[in-house]
Image (tube, rainbow, N blue to C red):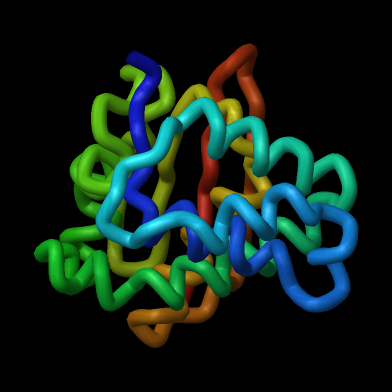
Amino acid sequence: MAGQLLGAYFKAVIGSMLGASTALLFPQQRKRIDAMRDDVWYEWDEYVKVVGEFHAKLGDQTLAAIGQTSALQTLPLSKAAGFDSLEKIFGNFEALTRDVVRDVPAAELIRTISFTRDRVVLECDTRVPPALLTGVFRGFLLGFGKIVTTEQVERRGATVRFTLGYV
């Protein structure tokens, strides 16, 4: 099994991509999202496919903004699951990934490499566009009152490393 994503998160990200201006471009996705339930698990591979389709049409900047918005929207769910501080989210991002994506493929786990009071370094092999993940990380930081001051995304083969500085 390639993993499953909880419906609330699937809907938050893809639903954010289906704003008024893009819903007409993706009628099948709109119908699918409208039929989803928050408490049901959906296939990770489907999520990856849909995100890729949106990325092809919308680009990196829009995807990063959507990632930020969806992280802010789902932050109450993360807090309710015990991820109620920056330390709990970024100190071990792998735990948050496992909470959101059941049976996530091992390589796609987002791992914390380092976390300090003003910088976080995360790493994973990802099929999700890095811009979306960068937006998600920004959203979590913003949700705890932090502003990203520097951002670096490096790709080494299949592995992507994200370094974000913040105040």
Residue plotted at (59% across, 72% down): 149
In the image, 142 versus 97, the foreground residue is: 97
* Whole-percent x, y for residue 33 in the image: 56, 57
Q: Is residue 77 above or below residue 29?
A: below
Residue plotted at (59% across, 51% down): 32
Name which quarter of the figure residue 150 lies in.
bottom right
Marker count (numbered): 0
Q: Quadrant of the N terminus?
A: top left
Residue reaching furthest to the left = 82
Residue plotted at (33% across, 35% down): 111
Q: Quadrant of the C terminus?
A: bottom left
Name which quarter of the figure residue 72 lies in.
bottom left
In the image, 34 versus 75, the foreground residue is: 34
In the image, 97 versus 77, the foreground residue is: 77
Q: Is residue 6 above or below residue 98?
A: below
Residue plotted at (69% across, 50% down): 29
Q: Is residue 107 above or below residue 138?
A: above
* Whole-percent x, y for residue 50 in the image: 66, 40
Along the horizontal axis of the image, is 63 left or right of 12?
right
In the image, 148 versus 142, the foreground residue is: 142
